[in-house]
Image (tube, helix red, strand yellow):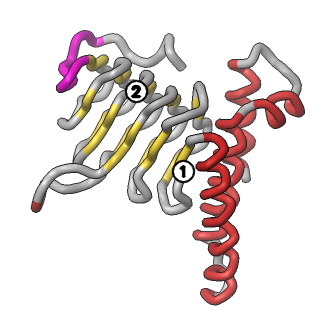
Amino acid sequence: MSSFSSDLKKYKKYSKNKSLLVLILTNQGLWALFVYRISNAVYHCKLPKIIIKVLLVFAVISQKWIEIITGISLPYTAQIGAGFYIGHFGGVIINPSAKIGTNCNISQGVTIGVSGRDGKRGVPIIGNNVYIGANAVIAGKIVVGDNCVIGANSLVNVSVEENKTVLGVPAKVISDNTSKNYI
């Protein structure tokens, strides 16, 4: 649960040091992350397979409940690094095979999903320290490098080198600014 501790620290920092109790009671992103972190830990634990399968039934029910009340879908099979931050609740969809690095921020309405055909079909790999703006879609067998900024309402369907800012539909590199001031 050290990943969840990192998540909590980030939420506390962004909230101007509100109490943890207030954050936990009022922040839907934290609810979704808490259920994800527990479910993911169960998925990766070293217990007998039958026990894991039983526990995963409860994990799936919990995740569906969180998805219904928050609009945030974080499947337990996704790989999400520590220090993850969901800026606002609602409309966040992450593919079960997605990989997201550490210290990333995403806003409401973000989709990280599958796209492509044949050998190009796949799911994105998101690097560390990536900021993803509201309503952005990142889809396909692509890599978004470390320290990138994905602008709001962008469609990213090609790989992005590290330390770039992209914007548009389809997204194009618009600057060499990094995510430093966003995260």
* Residue with the mark numbered 2: 135
Which disc, if any, is residue 74? 1
Q: Amino acid at mark 1?
A: Leu
Q: Dot 2: few (<14), some (14–19), or many (≥20) neighbours within 10 Å? A: some
Identify the residue at horizontal 67%, vertical 81% (top origin): 54
Q: Which residues are magenta?
A: 168-176
Q: Earlier in the sequence, mark 1 or mark 2?
A: 1
Indicate the position of residue 66 as horizontal and vertical percent values: 66, 50
Give the SS element for disc 2. Answer: loop
Name the image quarter holding residue 8. Answer: top right
Closer to us: 88 or 45? 88
Residue 131: in magenta span: no
Q: Which residue is painted at 35% across and 23% down in the image?
A: 150
* Res 7 → quadrant: top right
Residue beneath the point at 30% across and 17% down:
165
Q: Is residue 122 above or below residue 112?
A: below
> In the figure, is residue 74 to the left or right of 148?
right
Quarter of the image for the C terminus: give it. top right
SS class, disc 1: loop
Query: x%, y% of residue 143?
Result: 27, 41
- Residue at 61 percent across and 81 percent down: it is 53
Most extreme residue toward the front is: 68
Residue 120 in the image: x percent, y percent? 13, 54
State whether residue 134 is above or below residue 56. Answer: above
Task: State whether residue 173 is above or below residue 43.
Answer: above
